[in-house]
Each structure stands twice: as C-alpha cells, then as structure tokens.
C-alpha cells in the first residue's frame, strides 16, 4: 500500500480535527509493523513527547491508541490548518505560520536525540524510497 493511500486511510479512520472548517496540518511517523514488532521503548518516548505536542495545540495519537487503528502509524500530530494560520494573514504569513508550527513539532520530537536514535534502529519499509548513503 502506498504512503499516500495509508495516509488517506488514516484520515478516514481518525477524522479531521475541525472537519467543517479546514483540512489538517499533520505529521506522521510510521514503521512496518511486521518487521518492527518490538518497539515499546520507542512508543514510550513518543507518548511522552505527545504531551508536549498536545500542549502546542496538536491532536496526537500513537500506535494502539483509540482513534489510531493503523499498526504502521507510530505517531501522528494533527491540527486544523485554520487554527495554525489564523484569519486574514497574507500568503507569506501563512507559509511562515505553517513552517513555524512544523518546526515546533519537529523540535519537540527531535530536540533530544533519544527518539532519533530509536527511529534509526527500525528496519526500513520495503516499499519506501531507498536512499543511498556513502560507505
């Protein structure tokens, strides 16, 4: 199943945060549940970080939480794009607001290296784009 198709399936299952107002800005971390079955340590770290993301206005779900029926999704943070942008800002301001919110989320997740180290131990998704790194 493609990454886009899994994302659409997730949105259908979990729903938008403000479906009558706007689409959502979202950040999703995923891993192949078949090749990475033992990731409780990583999930514990993500659940701790989820509290920080929620304090910044995001709806956050991790694997096996109600509303996240997708075994591939380790974490998803989502927020109504309208609440991120506010009303009446010009295009440049919208771009900056979106960038700033994503940057806040990324800093929460990767400000310390424990989540990054745990993610680097995961086996890659076989259908994902392969990146060649120098030997």
Image: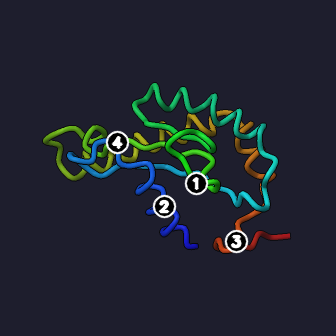
Q: How many marks?
A: 4
From the viewer's side, name the closer residue of 73 and 112: 73
Q: Which circle, 3 or 2, is nearer the viewer?
A: 2
Q: Residues within 10 Å of mark 1 (few under 14, many from 20)?
A: some
Q: Which circle, 1 or 3, is nearer the viewer?
A: 1
- The residue pinned by badge 1 equals 70
**Picture residue at 59% right of the left edge, 41% below the top:** 62
Along the polypeptide, which appears first: circle 2 or circle 4? 2
Kindly check if marks 3 and 4 are in contact, taking CB atoms under 8 A apart as contact. no
Mark 4: secondary structure: loop
**Picture residue at 43% right of the left edge, 35% below the top:** 58
Along the polypeptide, which appears first: circle 3 or circle 2? 2
Q: Residues within 10 Å of mark 3 (few under 14, many from 20)?
A: few
Per the rendering, the mark at residue 7 is 2
- The residue pinned by badge 4 equals 17
From the viewer's side, name the closer residue of 91 and 68: 68
Residue 133 at what x, y percent from top left? 77, 69
Along the polypeptide, which appears first: circle 2 or circle 1? 2
Residue 31 at what x, y percent from top left? 68, 57
Give the CA separation, mark 2 to mark 4. Answer: 15 Å
Give the CA separation, mark 3 to mark 2. Answer: 21 Å
Give the CA separation, mark 3 to mark 4. Answer: 33 Å
């Amino acid at each position: 199943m493609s990454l886009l198709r899994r994302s659409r399936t997730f949105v259908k299952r979990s729903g938008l945060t403000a479906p009558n107002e706007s689409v959502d800005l979202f950040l999703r971390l995923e891993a192949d549940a078949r090749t990475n079955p033992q990731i409780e340590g990583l999930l514990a770290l993500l659940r701790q970080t989820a509290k920080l993301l929620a304090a910044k206005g995001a709806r956050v779900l991790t694997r096996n939480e109600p509303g996240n029926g997708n075994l591939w999704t380790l974490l998803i943070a989502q927020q109504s794009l309208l609440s991120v942008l506010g009303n009446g800002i010009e295009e440049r301001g919208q771009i900056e607001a979106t960038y700033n919110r994503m940057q806040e989320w990324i800093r929460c997740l990767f400000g310390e290296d424990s989540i990054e180290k745990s993610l680097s131990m995961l086996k890659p998704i076989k259908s994902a784009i392969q990146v060649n790194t120098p030997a």
